[in-house]
Image (spheres, helix red, strand yellow):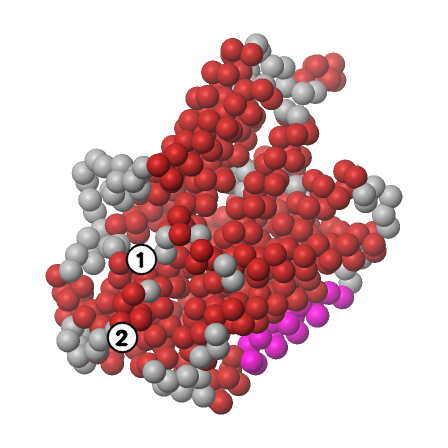
Amino acid sequence: MDTLTLIDNVVLVAYVVLMLGMGVFFARGQKDEKDYLLGGGKVHWILLGASFVATSFSGVSFAGIPGYLFKYDPRVAIQSLGALLGIPVVLLLVPRLHALKTLSAYEFLEQRYHISLRFLASGLWIAAKMTWISVALYAAGLVLTESAGIPLTPSIVLIGSAVTLLTMMGGLKGVVWTDAIQAVIMISGMALVAWYAVRLSGEDVAALWQTASGDGKTWFFDFRFSMREPVFWICITMPIVQSSGGVMSDQLMIQRFSSADSASSARKSFVFFMLVVVGFTWLMYFLSIMLYGFYHGGAHALPPEVRANPDRALAHFVMSVLPVGIRGLLIASIIAATASTATSILNSSCALTMADFYDKYLGRNDSPRKRVIVSRIVTVGWGLFAILFAANFKRMTALGIVGEATPKLAGLLGSGIAGIFMLGHFFPRVNAAGAVAGLLAGTGTVAWFMFGTDVHFLWYFPSGFAVTLLAGYAASLAFGRGQRKGEHHERKRV
C-alpha cells in the first residue's frame, strides 16, 4: 500500500497550519472567561449548527461506521430516523436551556438537589467525554498510521497535540469557526470517496449494492423483538430518549445553547444540526456499502491485517486506490472530524473544571485575565490526559471496535445523569437522596448489561435512563417528599 506523497503531505500540513492560524486569530480580544468559553454569548446559529455537526462526527464515525458495517450490518443506521422524532421534544427544552447562560450545565443540580450531585455529575461527564475523545484520537491515529506509515502512538501524540494547541489558543469562538470549516471538508470528502468507490470498481451502484446485499450488509429493517440485536424498535427508541433526556445534561449542548444570541437562534442551530447529521449518517452508510461491494466483488481484496481490524478499511481504500493530492485532502478531512470533536470536548471540559471545581475553591478572587490563563492551562492538562488514554485504548476490550465504543460510554456514564436531570426538571417530589439512588441504580444496570450479559449496547442508554427515573422517584417517596431547593424563596417572591 502507498503512503502519503509530498503533495499529500503539503495538503495535510496546509490544513493543520490553517486551523492553528484560526486559533491564533481568535485568541485576540479574549478579555475574560465569557469570551474564552462562551464566545461572548453572540455566536451565529449557522456556526453553532455546523459546530454541532462537526462535533458529532469524528474519526470514530469515519473509522467506526465502515468498520461496524464490515463486521456486522447497517441496522443501527435507523437510529438517525429516531433522532428526527426527538426534535420536537428538544425544541421545547431549548428556551429553558438557553436561559441558563451558565458555564456549567450542572449548576442546576446544586440548585435543585445538593452540591455533591453537581460534583458527581460533572466528574462523570468529564470522564465519559475524555474517554470519548481518546477513542476519537485513537481512530484518527489509525488513519494516520495507515496513510503515513507513522507508528500508532506517535500518530496519536501528533494529532492530540495539534487539537489541544488549537483549543487552548482559540477558545469557543475558534472552536466553532474551525468546526464549520471542518464540517464542509468532511462532508465533501466522504461524498468524493463514495464517488471514487463506484467509479474505480468498474461496476455501477446497483452491482456494488447487490454484492453487499448478498452478505446481509443492506439489512436495515429488523422488526423482531430482541435485546441482543439492533432491531428496529430499539434503534428508534434509543435516539429519542438520548436526544430528549441527554440534551438537558450534555455540557456540549448547553454550552453551545448558552453561547447563542437568542433562544430562537439556539433552536435554529439544533434543527440545522439534526437535518445535516441525518443526511451525513446515511451518506456514511452508503459509502460503507459501496466500499464493501468494492472489496468483496472479486476484483479487489482487503489484506489480512485490515480484515482483522475493519476500522482500518476506509483509510486503506483512501491510500490504496485514490490519486495523489486527493488522498491528502481526505486524510485531512478525517483528521478534521477528529479535531472538531476533540476541540469541542476539551473546551467544554475546561468550562466544567473552571465552573464546578476551580471556582468553588481556588478562583473566587482571580482577575478576568488570570482566569483565561488558568483556563488555557486546564485545557492543556485535559489534552495531555486524552492523549495518554488514547495510546492505551486497545487495552479497553469491553468497548469493542471503535463504532461500538461511543454508545457504550454514553449508556454507562451518561444515562443516569440524564435521568436525574429529567427528575429534577419535571418531578418536584424527587429529592437529593432519591436522585442519588436513581443514579446508582441506572448506572449499575448499564454496568451489569455491559459486563455480565450479551444485551446489545443500544439498550444501554434507554435502560439506564428508565431505571434512574423509576428508582429515583420510588426512593424519593420512601425517603419522604423533598422540597425543591429554593422553593420557599420562590413562593415568597410571588
The C terminus is located in which quarter? top right
The N terminus is located in which quarter? bottom left
> What residue lies at 18% left-to-right and 38% top-to-bottom?
224
**Residue highlighted by disc 1:** 68
Residue 25 magenta-drawn?
A: yes
Residue 131 magenta-drawn?
A: no
> What residue lies at 66% left-to-right and 45% top-to-bottom?
352
Residue 271 is situated, as x and y percent measured from the top left of the image, at: 46, 49
Q: Which portion, as a residue range, is magenta?
A: 13-28
By secondary structure, the bulk of the magenta-drawn segment is best described as: helix
Q: Nearer the viewer, residue 310 or 165?
A: 310
Q: First in sequence: mark 1 or mark 2?
A: 1
Query: As displayed, is residue 433 above or below residue 19?
Result: above
Compute the Cα span from label 1 to label 2. Answer: 17 Å
Which of the labelled discs sits on residue 303, or is there none?
Answer: 2
Q: Are marks 1 and 2 in contact (CB under 8 Å)?
A: no
